[in-house]
Image (cartoon, rainbow, N blue to C red):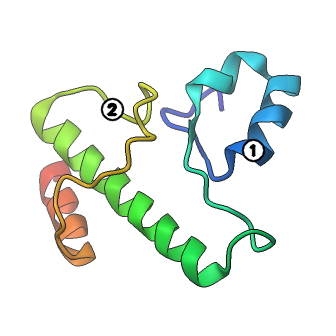
Amino acid sequence: MVGATRTVMLKEQEHRPKLEASFPFWVDQVSYWDIHDIDVEPPSTALVKLEQRVLWFIDSLANRHASGSPDPIATGAGNDLTPSTSAPRHQHLSRLANRLG
């Protein structure tokens, strides 16, 4: 995690206690997305949530790059998971590729 510019953990309830015990400094440097494991949520639901969050993340990177604003994941705002657009996934990926060159 030392060299990482962003760290996302998929289930806060599971990962935060382990992180606090071993690396308490990092607890507030991580974004938690609360994607549940199979014992709580079926894969069909969890994967949809994960896809939405990854698309939001791509969108936030593209918007940050274009505007010069801080990275929402790195600044801890990564838990606000509302995409700025409802564009199809290929448009998110295409826009990111165009902005990042």
Residue 46 location, quadrant = bottom right
Q: Please state the horizontal and vertical placement of residue 26, each as a whole percent of the image.
A: 67, 23
Residue 9 screen position, x and y as percent: 64, 46
Foreground residue among 77 and 8: 77
Which residue is most to the bottom?
Answer: 44
Q: Is residue 26 above or below residue 18?
A: above
Which residue is farthest top? Answer: 25
Q: Which residue is mark 1?
A: 13
Q: Amino acid at mark 1?
A: Gln
- Which dot marks residue 71? 2
Number of numbered discs present? 2
**Residue pictured at 18% horizontal, 67% vertical:** 86
Question: Does residue 56 sit above or below 6 in this rendering?
Answer: below
SS type, badge 1? helix
Q: Residue at x 48, y 32 (%)?
A: 5
Residue 42 percent across, percent down from the top left: 67, 80
What's the residue at 68%, 43% (across, down)? 12
CA gap, disc 1 to disc 2?
24 Å
Specify few, some or many for label 1: CA neighbours under 10 Å numbering under 14, 14-19, or 20 or more.
few
The answer to which image quadrant residue 88 occupies is: bottom left
Q: Earlier in the sequence, mark 1 or mark 2?
A: 1
As rendered, which of 4 and 41 lies closer to the eye? 41
In-image side of 35 versus 91 (left or right): right
